[in-house]
Amino acid sequence: ALHPSLKILDVVISENVILHDADLHILKNYYPFREDYKADPKLIELCRNACERIENRSFQVHTGRIASGDRFIEDKAVKADIIERFSPWCVEMEGASVGQVAYMNDTPFLIIRSISDNADDGAYEVYDNFVDLAAHNSAQIVLNMMALYTE
């Protein structure tokens, strides 16, 4: 979690994804000439509807930017730097890569993140306590998306 509104187990649906640890000059000036990748609006709506179907839901759903990088963030100074430079809702390690590959293959995409920690001191300990619940919530959302898509 990077945004102050997020709580553990809340869900962030990507509006767009960006690499927080890459040179933006390189990203903008070399193929594929993008610094971020926008998620598919239809998939965003499908995901929001899937979240609404979860009975007794104990988490909030947010839509916004997700930042990706090559390491697990567990330092409040690194967290503050990412927030200052990119204003993302959360940080993770895979979403921007998925976005880039989808963009390069003209394929719609969406990233869903269930928050497992606060990306600060003690993040590993918190992560260990919530990773299973976060994964369960994400799986339920995807299953609901599949059900809605086939209805």
Image (spheres, rainbow, N blue to C red):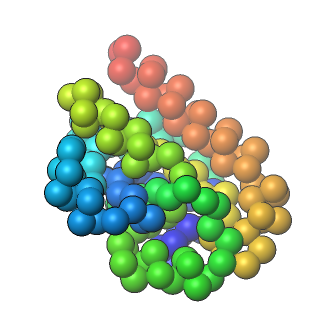
Residue found 82% across the figure and 65% down from its top: 125
The location of residue 122, given as percent across then percent down, is: 77, 74
Image quadrant in which you'd find residue 8: bottom right
Image quadrant in which you'd find residue 100: top left
Image quadrant in which you'd find residue 109: top left
Q: Can see residue 70?
A: yes
Q: Can see residue 45?
A: no
Query: Which is nearer the eye, 76 or 149?
Result: 76
The location of residue 49, given as percent across then percent down, is: 38, 39
The location of residue 2, given as percent across then percent down, is: 51, 72
The location of residue 72, given as percent across then percent down, is: 64, 61
106 sits left or right of 80 in the view: left
Location of the N terminus by quadrant is: bottom right
Query: Which is nearer the eye, 114 or 50?
Result: 114
Query: Which is nearer the eye, 30 or 114?
Result: 30
Residue found 47% across the figure and 56% down from its top: 68
Location of the C terminus by quadrant is: top left
57 sits left or right of 65 in the view: right
Q: How many marks?
A: 0
Task: Name above or below for residue 104 compared with residue 148.
Answer: below
Task: Name above or below for residue 103 compared with residue 16.
Answer: above
Residue found 35% across the figure and 54% down from its top: 17
Residue found 50% across the figure and 58% down from its top: 69
